[in-house]
Image: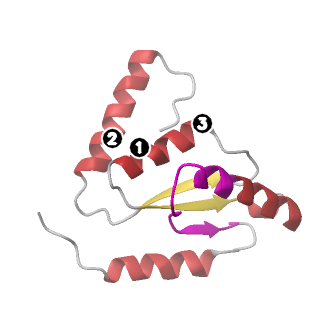
Amino acid sequence: YGYAQRSKEMQRQIKKIIEDYILERQQMTCLFILVDSRHDPQKIDLEFMEWLGENSVPFAIVFTKLDKLSSAAAKKQTEKYRNTLLESWESLPPIFYTSSADMRGRNELLDYIEELNKLPLECE
């Protein structure tokens, strides 16, 4: 959903493709949003999460690149994100803390995906 350097028309087209895919994908049980833990909450990410909530799309947040931060800095950044979300959310979606470099959070994330895969798909 990030558009980089695109024209307004191209951004509109990409947004429609993404929204249609997400809303019409009946097999999807959870959308994972990858968030670079080194950055403050980004407006585009917060707006996207808000849109997901408004459309009852289940999602989880996966903080990435925790190996790039000290333990204290990682805690501070992820808490800042959580607190920002709690300004408009009553409860938070599942949150995972990961690093591909040191495999941090890998097992927890895989266990969650395994549990999701055990859930029956709802038919309309």
Label 3, label 1: how far apart the Cα atoms are: 12 Å
Front in this rendered view, residue 81 or 101: 81
Q: Quadrant of residue 100?
A: bottom right
Q: Secondary structure at mark 2?
A: helix
Whether the magenta-drawn stretch holds residue 37 is answered as no
Three-letter amino acid code at disc 2?
Answer: Glu
Residue shown at the point (75%, 62%) measured from the top left: 66
Return the x and y of residue 80 as percentages of the image width and height. Answer: 73, 53
Q: Secondary structure at mark 3?
A: helix
Residue 8 placement (x, y as % from top left): 44, 16
Assess disc 2: are there few (<14), some (14-19) or many (≥20) residues with their C-alpha within 10 Å of its C-alpha. some
Q: Which residues are magenta?
A: 81-100
Rendering quarter of residue 74: bottom right
Marks 3 and 1, the one that precedes in the sequence: 3
Position of residue 27 in the picture relative to residue 30 (left or right): left
Numbered badge on residue 19: 2
What residue appears at the point 35 percent right and 78 percent down from the top-left corner?
117
Q: Residues within 10 Å of mark 1 (few under 14, many from 20)?
A: few
